[in-house]
Image (cartoon, rainbow, N blue to C red):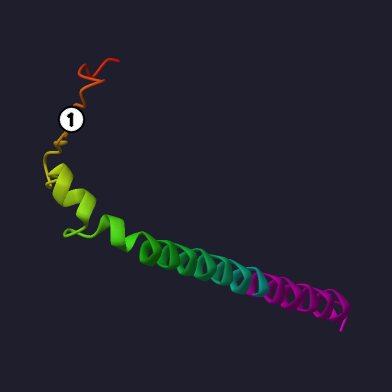
Amino acid sequence: MDNFATIFLNFQKRGKAESQAGMILVVMVFQVFTVLLEIDRLEKELAPWTAADAHGKIRAGAGPNSFSVKLVFTATPHHCSPLS
């Protein structure tokens, strides 16, 4: 019985620490889940421009290992130089 108070208090402290650790874990999981939802939302929003058949990718000629840009220059009688 001489150690009862110390043992009791240590069990209480351990329970409190476990509860805090559990809450921290819940908060971290929620934050990760929130970030993953945001990434998913942004991916869906960017899908029209990042899809393999996106108009810009077809025009630019993007491939898995290369990237080329097709330049279209139209000259008018008043502006015949691309530098003007």
User: Residue tagged by mark 1?
Assistant: 73
- Asked if residue 42 lies left or right of residue 11, the reply is left
Please state which of residues 1 and 6 is positioned toward the viewer in this rendering: 6
Q: Quadrant of residue 30?
A: bottom right
Q: Secondary structure at mark 1?
A: loop
Picture quarter containing residue 54? bottom left
The quarter of the image holding the C terminus is: top left
Q: Please report the residue visible at 59 percent of the width from the left and 70 percent of the height from the top.
A: 25
Q: Residue at x 17, y 58 (%)?
A: 52
Q: In the rendered structure, which segment of residues is drawn in magenta?
A: 1-22
Q: Which sits in the foreground, 70 or 61?
A: 70
> Which quadrant of the figure contains the N terminus?
bottom right
| 53 relative to 81, above or below | below
Question: Is 53 positioned to the left or the right of 3 in the image?
Answer: left
| Mark 1 Cα-neighbour bin, 10 Å: few <14, some 14–19, many ≥20 | few
Residue appearing at x 51%, y 65% in the figure: 32
Q: Is residue 17 magenta?
A: yes
